[in-house]
Amino acid sequence: MPTVDMEGVRVLGVRHHGPGSARAVRAELERLRPEAVLIEGPPEADALVHLVGELEPPVALLAHRTGRGTESGGEQGWAFWPFASFSPEWVALRYAVEHGAEVRFCDLPAAHTLAPEPEPEPEPDGDSAAPADPLGTLARAAGYDDTERWWDDVVEQRGDGEPSPFPAIQEAMAAVRDEAGSGGPRTERREAHMRQVLRATLRTGHHRVAVVCGAWHAPALHGTARHTVKDDTALLKGLPRAKVAATWVPWTHGRLASAAGYRAGVSAPGWYHHLFSAPDRPVHRWLTDAARTLREDEGQAVSSAHVIEGVRLAETLAALRGRPLAGLDEVREALTGVLCEGHEARAALVHGRLALGERMGSVPPSTPMVPLQHDLAAQRRRLRLKAEPFTRDLDLDLRKDLHRERGVLLHRLRVLDVEWGVPRTPEGGHRGTFREAWRLRWEPEMDVALIEAARWGATVEEAAAARVTELADDADLRVLTALTEQCLLAALDTALPAVLARLTDRAATDADVTALMAALPPLARAGRYGDVRRTEGAHLRSVADGLLRRVCAGLAPALRGLDDDAAAHAAALLDRTHQAVTLLGAEPLRSWTGTLSALAGDDRLPGRVAGRVDRILSDAGELDPATLRRRLARTMSPGTEPARAAAWLEGFLQGSGLVLVHDERLLDLIDTWLTGLSPERFADVLPLLRRTFGAFAAPERRRIGAAATRTRSTAEPERPPPDPARAEPAVAAVGAILAHAAAERPHGRVTA
């Protein structure tokens, strides 16, 4: 076997996403002038290197499985390899592209790592973190109890012009590997492939080669000559394969943070970006930005004197702690103590915002995308909707064409499981037929969802319609009505007929009254949306009317003989059904209230259901106060079990007890019933009563208590004025008793 000439090879072991590592890599590349640069990452991305000059970091390489069946199996068929402006790998990419050097990614291909057969010891998100904690080991050896602080002091906060750290890093990692081992079979396979790519690059005639990889792998690649081709080939033999594709996608600083669960993440991406991009005096510039944020966003008066004193404090703290440069801890303390004058909450808010430094990168239109991604990008531009990593509220007036089209797009994306927008309750809780309120936030994983949804169509509308039709094939009645509503919200006119036909067939054969009741509300809303969104709603209302007729016909037997849990569910269904029927018009409402009136007073109904029926009828004006009181008096009579009476009361008062404030005679009946219970019976019903009244808001409970006090005081009989004639014998008797007591006590004194 020919010997590998490693004379012109430089292995640069880095920490992913470190500004000091990035500056050191740039300085080393400028010194070496390599003909080829190998970078840890999936080889499938080699064809995407030409786009580097048009990308704005943070960005990520996305590799995903393609072909049939990629959406199933419950396995993650994709992985990201993120890059920030301060990532050493990104600096190496930019250098190679700008200087015409050949670039190759040398990690194990994504075709293997994303294959359906699970790999032992998986490492998510393309992370090459070592199985051990080498940085922690080295930090402890150096006398640090904080790994981040040690690495920052030794590497990340190094300035330009300092000696190369890579020989020392490689030597330290070799020592850790000798003690902890190589890291397991997966790591060994990855390093075998990296060595194979390095050998292939040298065979092409390149004499100066730079390899940029995780520090853990540096000793394994530097010692390539000690590993045989045969052994590395054996390690890679028989690995499972999958068909994959790769592309660039925008990324965010939030996703680079370790707090997001990214194993190779950093604690403060905004701070690292600042350290890398600030040309000089990073502490001065950081605290100046903090002062600007306090003035503009928090309205706090911060002067240049605050900044100057803050810089002095940060630098003094760094000197006292033996640090080469004030770090994040020092600038945080300066921000709190000087700029925020000790207000920790305000300082924490500003510091957190700057430390994260949230931003989203961008990719050019020429980036490989599935047609669905291209269509969404075009629609975003047309509708002036920007994908941002920040949470933003969006209020829409559906009477305006632009607003209606925005809402349609967001609803279509939700059908495809792309939750860019999530419906929210508008401020003040105001709802209206012509209004929608959304909360927007774009996440990088949504590009994956778009890629997975591409099998349904090339445009957002086409894909959403195809998916709704597919979901409708095996859906039950409740899901079908929800899909009908989605079709109208998302303006999926091509899918609506098929969904309605399926809904009509299922409604005609479903005998479950509770299922029919659950299906009615979304269908009633859909009929209303049909009018608002300029969609024909007559057929929808016809189907809803048919459902209501079947509900009315089977309601009585469906509500009898229920246990407590089923009765609670039935009471909630009655409420939702009543609200839905009010949307269908006067005639369906009369039919519904007529059915409830026929049920009212039926002793076979559970107490909670009976109480809810009476409340619905009372609120609808179909049950006059006198009849309601008679029904309540019968329910509260001694011949009725107190538990049933309490259940009726819970059903009647569910949601609001203000009816007791406005009808004091009704309140008096309940008060009389409660005070007449025996202690044992009262103890039995107390939990139900506590649950009923405890659900009311505090102001409502106070008003009910005040009404009860008024009712009781007015119910007390008036006392007649005293009658002197009737009182005269009693007064005489008391006088005689006192006189006799005085005679028996000559030295005492008795007074009346």
Image (cartoon, rainbow, N blue to C red):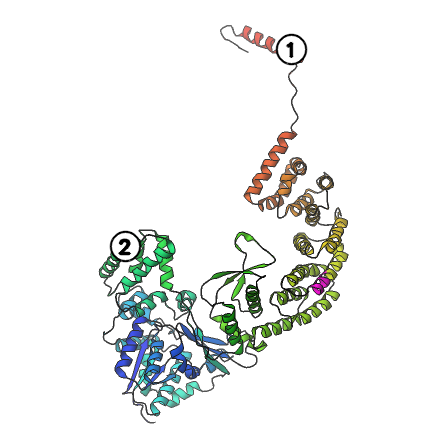
Q: Which mark is residue 306?
A: 2
Along the line of sight, the residue nearer the viewer: 647 or 544: 544
* Residue neighbourhood size for the residue with mark 1, other residues' Cα within 10 Å, grouped as few (<14), some (14–19), many (≥20): few
Q: Which mark is residue 390?
A: none
Residue at position x 30%, y 62% in the image: 286
What amino acid is labelled 1 in the image? Glu
The answer to the question of whether label 2 and label 1 lie on touching residues, with beta carbons closer than 8 A, is no
Locate residue 175 relative to residue 744 in the image: left or right: left
Along the line of sight, the residue nearer the viewer: 180 or 19: 19
Q: Main secondary structure of the magenta part?
A: helix
Residue 139 is situated, as x and y percent measured from the top left of the image, at: 29, 68
Locate residue 297 relative to residue 748 in the image: left or right: left
**Closer to us: mark 2 or mark 1?**
2
Quadrant placement of the N terminus: bottom left
Q: Quadrant of residue 293?
A: bottom left
Magenta-tinted stretch: 534-544
In what element is the residue under mark 2? helix
What amino acid is labelled 2 in the image? His
Whether residue 275 is situated above or below residue 655 in the rendered picture: below
- Residue hosting label 1: 728
